[in-house]
Image (cartoon, rainbow, N blue to C red):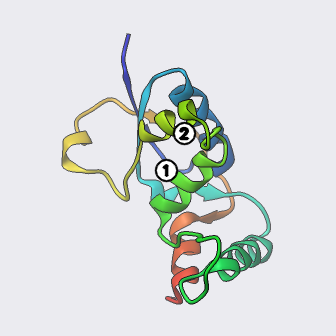
């Protein structure tokens, strides 16, 4: 039985991917997610951007408070973390088994990956990340 699962995040829906990964890591698997910047958040574009802007403003770098990340791989890991019992021991251990990468690192290029099928409409984590960092 494989201990490590490699997932290509291109065209995958954020919530569905995060819940799938949360189940796998709680069962003891190690999960590596590549192309995390191409994961899609489904919904109306304006509403999605407003929601992430509010999360970031609630505790951004200028204030003390809950920190919300602005990089795509960190947003993904935060979403997965929120689907785990991360304040308990088993949740902390499970979160350590999650690795997220922007793009595909050299050591994973030749490996077999799980891919999402189909095209979906929505906003990629890369676009959300650029908006949160003030880029265009």
- Which quadrant is home to the N terminus? top left
Q: Quarter of the image holding residue 114?
A: top left
Q: Left or right: 82 with respect to 10?
A: right
Can I make out residue 114 in this image?
yes
Label 1 secondary element: loop
Q: Left or right: 59 with respect to 1?
A: right
Can I make out residue 119 in this image?
no
Label 2 secondary element: loop
> x, y percentage for residue 125?
55, 64
- Residue on which disc 2 sits: 116
Q: Label 2: how many residues lie within 10 Å, few (<14), some (14-19) or many (20+)?
A: some
Q: Quarter of the image holding residue 2?
A: top left
Q: Which of 60 and 23 is in front in this view?
A: 60
Q: Report, in whole angstroms, how far the alpha carbon at label 2 lies from the one at label 1.
A: 7 Å
How many callouts does the rendering have?
2
Q: Does residue 108 lie above or below 133 as drawn?
A: above
Q: Does residue 35 lie above or below 20 as drawn?
A: below
Whether the residues at callouts 2 and 1 have beta carbons within 8 Å, the answer is yes
Residue at image coords 53%, 69%: 69
> x, y percentage for residue 21?
55, 35
Q: Left or right: 90 with respect to 31?
A: right
Residue at image coords 49%, 58%: 38
> x, y percentage for residue 12?
58, 47
Residue at image coords 80%, 73%: 47
Say which label, 2 or 1, has the lower sequence index: 1
Residue at image coords 41%, 53%: 35
Residue 10, numbered label: 1
Q: Does residue 8 lie above or below 5 as drawn?
A: below
Instruction: Give the residue furthest to the top.
Output: 1
Instruction: Give the residue furthest to the left.
Output: 106
Q: Does residue 60 lie above or below 114 as drawn?
A: below
> x, y percentage for residue 110?
22, 36
């Amino acid at each position: 039985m494989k201990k490590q699962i490699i997932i290509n995040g291109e065209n995958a829906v954020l919530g569905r991917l995060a819940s799938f990964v949360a189940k796998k890591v709680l069962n003891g698997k190690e999960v590596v997610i590549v192309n995390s910047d191409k994961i899609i958040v489904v919904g109306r574009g304006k509403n999605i951007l407003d929601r992430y802007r509010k999360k970031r403003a609630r505790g951004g770098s200028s204030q003390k408070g809950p920190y919300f990340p602005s990089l795509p791989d960190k947003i993904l890991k935060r979403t997965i973390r929120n689907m785990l019992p991360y304040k308990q021991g088993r949740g902390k251990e499970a979160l350590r088994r999650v690795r997220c990468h922007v793009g595909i690192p050299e050591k994973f290029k030749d490996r077999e990956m799980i891919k999402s099928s189909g095209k979906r409409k929505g906003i990629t984590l890369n676009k959300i990340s650029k908006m949160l960092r003030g880029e265009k």
